[in-house]
Image: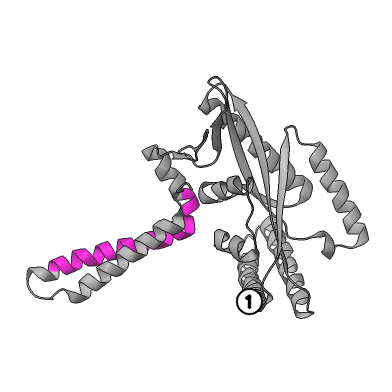
């Protein structure tokens, strides 16, 4: 199994370093030269604690930047690898042609179950319009599973509080963004609807959707550039046609989708462990 550098692992490492430094600072004496050493070690501890936040919150930005600058590649066995940019999977089937595959994660706020007959008909037309507008061979995958209801209600309630807070802050701005407000309202309605279904006794369902596209090139760089262009075009078309949010997956998220093409998790416990 390949080891893919990700923000969560680096944040845990930074947290461990920060904890060790805090223990050293506590044990050092506070007299003479030791006072200066203690201050320097405290500064290192502060930097480590800051790195914990940065890697955990913005790892998807920082890690590709680091791997790109250091030219770190991740071999996946057979003929595949993750290049330093960590935003595609590159493979070669012969000596002359290279293949690059990009993945996009989809955030779907409403399901067909939650729509009326009229809304479902309109959504079906939107989906057909989105499919017919795609210029490249595109694979849309969806993993569906029943979630553990014992903890799901509290998680949904926390999500609602968080979105309500963001929505109120956006509305209170001197120049609020109407597009952002509409997205937050849509997301809030989806989570509120889910909470109502939970309280009525319905089992919570979860779906993970992602899109796959592959490009071919005479070199790795050519194939990578083509795959990124295709992914961006698909992203723009699907976002507008279906009213969903999508993002090009990188790092560990990219690797998970690559693995799921061969073998999916056996149960909801395993899939949530992979996602968390």
Q: What element carries label 1?
A: helix
Classified by dominant secondary structure, the portion drawn in magenta counts as helix
The residue that appears at 68% across and 45% down in the rendered structure is 211
The answer to whether any part of residue 249 appears in the image is no
Q: Is the image coloured rainbow, by chain, by secondary structure, or in one colour?
A: one colour
Q: What stretch is highlighted in magenta?
A: 36-61
Q: Is residue 53 magenta?
A: yes
- Residue 213 image position (x, y, % from top left): 66, 37
- Of 140 and 259, the residue lying toward us: 259
- Of 103 and 261, the residue lying toward us: 261
Crowd around label 1: few <14 · some 14–19 · many ≥20 (10 Å) = few
Determine which quarter of the picture holds residue 180: bottom right
The answer to whether any part of residue 209 appears in the image is yes
- Of 29 and 13, the residue lying toward us: 13
Q: Is residue 164 magenta?
A: no
Label 1: which residue?
Answer: 151
Judged left or right of residue 132, residue 91 is: left
- Residue 41 image position (x, y, % from top left): 21, 65
Determine which quarter of the picture holds residue 153: bottom right
Judged left or right of residue 147, residue 33 is: left
Judged left or right of residue 37, residue 228 is: right
Determine which quarter of the picture holds residue 179: bottom right
- The quadrant of the image that shows the C terminus is bottom right
The residue that appears at 90% across and 63% down in the rendered structure is 116
The count of marks equals 1
- Residue 275 image position (x, y, % from top left): 57, 59
What is the residue that sits farthest to the left in this orientation? Answer: 32
Judged left or right of residue 60, residue 135 is: right
* Looking at the image, residue 159 lies above or below residue 225: below
- Of 67 and 232, the residue lying toward us: 67
């Amino acid at each position: 199994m390949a080891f893919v550098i990700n923000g969560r692992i680096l944040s845990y490492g930074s947290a461990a370093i920060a904890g060790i430094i805090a223990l050293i600072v506590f044990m050092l004496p506070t007299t003479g030269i030791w006072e200066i050493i203690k201050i320097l070690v405290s500064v290192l501890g502060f930097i480590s604690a800051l790195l914990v936040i940065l890697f955990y919150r913005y790892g998807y930005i920082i890690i590709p930047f680091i791997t790109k600058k250091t030219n770190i590649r991740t071999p996946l066995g057979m003929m595949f690898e993750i290049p330093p940019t960590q935003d595609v999977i590159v493979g070669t089937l012969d000596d002359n042609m290279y293949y690059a595959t990009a993945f996009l994660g989809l955030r779907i706020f409403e399901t067909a179950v939650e729509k009326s007959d009229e809304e479902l008909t309109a959504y079906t037309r939107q989906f057909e319009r989105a499919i017919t507008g795609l210029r490249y061979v595109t694979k849309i995958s969806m993993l569906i599973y029943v979630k553990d209801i014992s903890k799901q209600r509290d998680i949904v309630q926390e999500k609602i509080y968080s979105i309500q807070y963001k929505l109120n802050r956006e509305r209170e701005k001197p120049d609020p963004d109407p597009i952002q407000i509409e997205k937050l309202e849509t997301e809030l309605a989806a989570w509120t609807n889910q909470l109502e279904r939970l309280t009525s006794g319905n089992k919570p369902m979860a779906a993970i959707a992602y899109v796959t596209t592959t490009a071919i090139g005479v070199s790795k760089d050519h194939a990578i550039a083509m795959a990124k262009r295709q992914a961006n075009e698909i992203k723009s078309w699907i976002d507008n046609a279906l009213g969903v949010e999508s993002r090009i997956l990188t790092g560990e998220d990219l690797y998970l989708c690559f693995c799921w093409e061969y073998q999916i998790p056996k149960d909801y416990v395993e899939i949530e462990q992979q996602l968390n």
